[in-house]
Image (tube, rainbow, N blue to C red):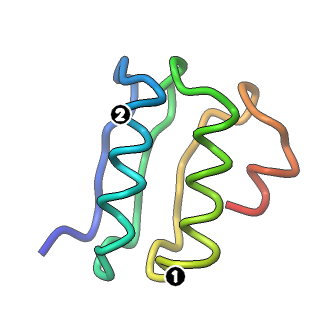
Amino acid sequence: MLRSLEIADNFFTDEGMIQLVNALRFNSKLNHLNIQGCNSVSQQSMIALESMVTEINMSLYLVQITYEDYDPDLIDRI
């Protein structure tokens, strides 16, 4: 059972992030996601992640993100 996913410093794009967000919609066991240093992902993908985390997958309680790349208010909600 996957409880932690460490994919920091990868070069996936918005398309990859959207695929990850869609997969996490059906995972109620993952508690930790590390996507620090994934700098090819836009603010729009972070909004999709925030929506998924706060509205669908409440089991994901720790998301590590490189903060300086995104709106601080958005990151605080994730």
| 68 w.r.t. 65: above or below | above
Answer above or below: position of 30 versus 18: below
Q: Amino acid at mark 1?
A: Met
Please state the horizontal and vertical placement of residue 20, each as a whole percent of the image.
35, 48
Residue 40 in the image, given as x and y percentages of width and height: 51, 18
Mark 2 belongs to which amino acid? Gly
Where residue 3 appears, as percent x and y from the top left, is: 26, 70
State whether residue 21 is above or below residue 38: below
Identify which residue is drawn at 59% across, 52% down.
48
Q: Which residue is mark 2?
A: 16
The residue lying furthest to the right in this view is: 73
Which residue sits at x=28%, y=80%?
Answer: 29
Q: Is residue 43 depicted above or below 23 in this figure? A: above
At x 47% / y 77%, what residue is drawn?
57
In which quadrant of the rendered view does residue 39 lie?
Answer: top right
Do tag 1 and tag 2 residues touch (Cβ < 8 Å)?
A: no
What secondary structure is found at the residue carrying circle 2? helix
Of callouts 1 and 2, the N-terminal one: 2
Nearest to viewer (mark 1 / mark 2) = 2
Image coords of residue 54 (percent x, y):
64, 74
Residue of label 1: 58
Q: Which label belongs to residue 8?
A: none
Residue positioned most to the left:
1
Q: Is residue 21 left or right of residue 28?
A: right
Relative placement, left or right, of 29 versus 11 is left
In depth, the one of 52 and 6 nearer the eye is 52
Kind of element beneath mark 1: loop
Q: Residues within 10 Å of mark 1 (few under 14, many from 20)?
A: some
